[in-house]
Amino acid sequence: MWPAVIWLVVGVVLIAAEVLSGEFVLLMLGGAALAAGGVSLLVAGPVVGGVVFVVSSGLLVFAVRPALRRRLDRGIEHTAMHSKALVGVTAQVVARVDGQGGRVKIGGDLWSARTLDHDDVIEAGRAVTVMDISGATALVVAQD
């Protein structure tokens, strides 16, 4: 009975540790440990539990996990996030922008901005393209 209890505790610990990693490896090993615990409880042998753990963990890690990862990755959009999503967007100059600073309106938000080329000067009212975001400052170039 003790081998079954040990396998069950190991399985629960591995499944709980999966919360920290998120890669599904520990989840698969935890499932294999639970299977080994169940078999050890029924057959009452630590060797049989070990064999079940090795076989089931191999199947779970190399057969089930890749299919699960593909299915989950398919549902996630791989788009630029946060400030990187603003790169390439058209903005409107609100206050004169030069190599030292200025203000632009991106979407509905005001951003501090400076020109990508420090010698350029862009007057208020002109359209610009956001080339990069440096901290909280948009680096922009004038649109022709």
Image (spheres, rainbow, N blue to C red):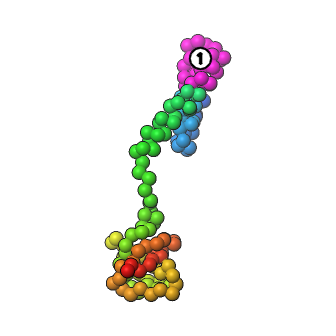
Q: Is residue 61 visible?
A: yes
* Above or below: residue 111 compared with residue 96: above
Q: Residue 118 location in percent, x, y?
A: 52, 84
Residue farthest toward the front in the current orientation of the protein: 144
> Which residue is at a point 59% across and 28% down the rendered structure image?
58
Question: In the picture provided, is 139 more to the left or to the right than 92?
Answer: right
**Quadrant (top left, top right, bottom left, bottom right) of the C terminus:** bottom left
Name the quadrant containing residue 75.
top left
Q: Is residue 23 above or below residue 98?
A: above
Residue 15 in sight: no
- Magenta region: which residues? 33-56
Identity of the amino acid at label 1? Ser
What percent of the width, then of the height, locates residue 15?
54, 35
Number of marks drawn: 1
Q: Is residue 58 left or right of residue 108?
A: right
Q: Main secondary structure of the magenta part?
A: helix
Quarter of the image with the N terminus in it = top right
Answer with left or right where residue 107 lies relative to residue 35: left
Q: Which residue is mark 1?
A: 40
Say if the magenta span includes residue 75. no
